[in-house]
């Protein structure tokens, strides 16, 4: 007996009156635009922590964990993209993570669970991006004016003003050029770090290279788990459905191309930063390779202009990261505040957008200035939040959609997937916000 047709609880005609969908999640992009967005969401200054992650694992296990986590996350995002494609073919295209989860899993509470986790993560990234951008400005200011009087909160205020201006770009799709620049910036500061490490290794002040692990077994085990947590959290991304929503319909198959673009950039940046930094500093690597290259005591181990340019590139990319992760908040706000019948740039919609987005950025900037240690808290919130969004839900959504037979090779895939997942679940609460290599 044929199954009754699956009714879409979020029909397309209801979205015609949904300004969050029509405006913020405007579906006009090509697959390479999705690649730009996804790369910005994943490839950030977090890669500067990878030498520190290798410090707790060594060469062999470091390469193994970096590769396995890359394969697992790519597989996870691929499964979610397949589920989104399947729903679209059945006439139920989903443009929000929460709608996808609620529809496929058939649970109203899942809608609110996803929106809560997404909002917590995205707001945390927004706060953290402003905080670390302010710290980058402070680093440059301190180098130019060692006795300057400006404080960190003043630089945070400057960054917040810039973010308020940039946040007025009305749609996720309108960030495509900014995110292309972000992609190039990530390649740029990775190249600069590699060059700086090569120069540091050949300088007269080159550090002694020692790749030995911790001497005591408990310390060695703890360091290994911390390193695995760092690597796992670096790959985190909780907005893939919203990114796929920016694709012009039909979106089927396009996101996979975007994923391939993103993971090509990941391959070059992640491995380059990890290998070059760990090769030079070994078990003396710090949580930020730039800090290793610019020690508090003694001269810099690479030309100042190279390191300064790398800091500038990191600063500029942080603006793009903050913008990408703020889009979910914007579409939630504009779903109720905007009128789709009066045009995106009408006075009726422009004034609420200006007010609400400005207040959101002021909120993020206020907490960045008030809690300069927010990165430590966000490490817990972010890593715990990414577990359900990036590891558990994609597998559940795929199994509920395709119902693969347990006797097939899918069972082996599922066991391998859960083996990797639970390893992260137990030890992955250390770090999301090393996103900026604190």
Image: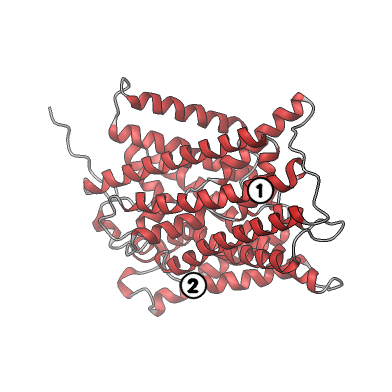
**Residue at left offset 75%, top offset 34%:** 212
Q: Residues within 10 Å of mark 1 (few under 14, many from 20)?
A: many
For the N terminus, the image quarter is top left
Please report whichever mark, 2 or 1, sits nearer to the chain's N-terminal start: 1
Q: How is the image coloured?
A: secondary structure
**Disc 1 target residue:** 49
Q: Residue furthest bottom?
A: 347
Give how far across and how far down residue 67 sits, in percent: 52, 38
Q: Select label 2 or label 1 by which is in front.
A: 1
- Of residue 286 and residue 271, the one placed in the foreground of this image is 271
Drawn side of residue 119 relative to residue 137, left or right: left
- Of residue 67 and residue 182, the one placed in the foreground of this image is 67
Give how far across and how far down residue 396 sits, in percent: 39, 34
Drawn side of residue 265 relative to residue 427, left or right: left
**Residue at left offset 40%, top offset 34%:** 395
**Disc 2 target residue:** 168
Q: Residues within 10 Å of mark 2 (few under 14, many from 20)?
A: some
């Amino acid at each position: 007996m044929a199954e009754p047709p699956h009714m879409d609880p979020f029909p397309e005609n209801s979205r015609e009156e949904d300004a969050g969908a029509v405006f913020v999640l405007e579906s006009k992009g090509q697959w390479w635009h999705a690649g730009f967005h996804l790369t910005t969401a994943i490839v950030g200054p977090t890669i500067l922590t990878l030498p520190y992650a290798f410090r707790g694992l060594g060469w062999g296990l470091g390469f193994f964990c970096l590769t396995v986590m890359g394969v697992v996350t790519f597989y996870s995002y691929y499964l979610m993209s397949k589920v989104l494609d399947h729903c679209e073919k059945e006439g139920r295209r989903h443009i929000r993570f929460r709608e996808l989860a609620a529809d496929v899993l058939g649970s109203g509470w899942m809608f609110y669970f996803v929106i809560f986790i997404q909002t917590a993560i995205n707001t945390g990234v927004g706060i953290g991006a402003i905080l670390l951008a302010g710290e980058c400005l402070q680093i440059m200011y301190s180098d130019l004016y060692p006795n300057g009087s400006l404080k960190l909160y003043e630089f945070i205020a400057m960054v917040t003003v810039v973010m308020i201006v940039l946040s007025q770009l009305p749609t996720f799709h309108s960030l495509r050029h900014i995110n292309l620049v972000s992609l190039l910036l990530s390649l740029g500061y990775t190249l600069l770090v590699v060059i700086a490490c090569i120069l540091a290794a050949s300088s007269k002040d080159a550090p002694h290279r020692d790749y030995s692990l911790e001497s005591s077994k408990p310390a060695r085990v703890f360091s290994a788990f911390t390193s695995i947590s760092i690597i796992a959290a670096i790959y985190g991304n909780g907005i893939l459905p919203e990114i796929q929503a920016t694709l012009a319909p039909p979106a089927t198959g396009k996101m996979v191309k975007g994923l391939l673009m993103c993971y090509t950039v990941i391959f070059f940046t992640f491995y380059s930063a990890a290998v070059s930094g760990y090769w030079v500093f070994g078990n003396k690597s710090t949580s930020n390779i730039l800090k290793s290259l610019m020690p508090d005591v003694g001269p810099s181990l690479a030309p100042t202009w190279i390191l300064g340019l790398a800091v500038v590139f990191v600063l500029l990319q942080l603006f793009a990261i903050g913008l990408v992760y703020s889009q979910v908040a914007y579409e939630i706000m504009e779903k109720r505040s905007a009128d789709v019948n009066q045009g995106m740039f009408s006075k009726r919609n422009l004034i609420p957008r200006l007010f609400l987005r400005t207040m959101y950025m002021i909120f993020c900037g206020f907490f960045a200035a008030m809690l300069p240690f927010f990165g430590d808290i966000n490490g817990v919130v972010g890593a715990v939040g990414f577990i359900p969004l990036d590891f558990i839900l994609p597998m559940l959504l795929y199994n509920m959609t395709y119902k693969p037979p347990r006797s097939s090779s899918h069972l082996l895939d599922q066991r391998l997937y859960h083996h990797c997942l639970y390893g992260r679940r137990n030890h992955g609460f250390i770090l999301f916000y090393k996103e900026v290599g604190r």
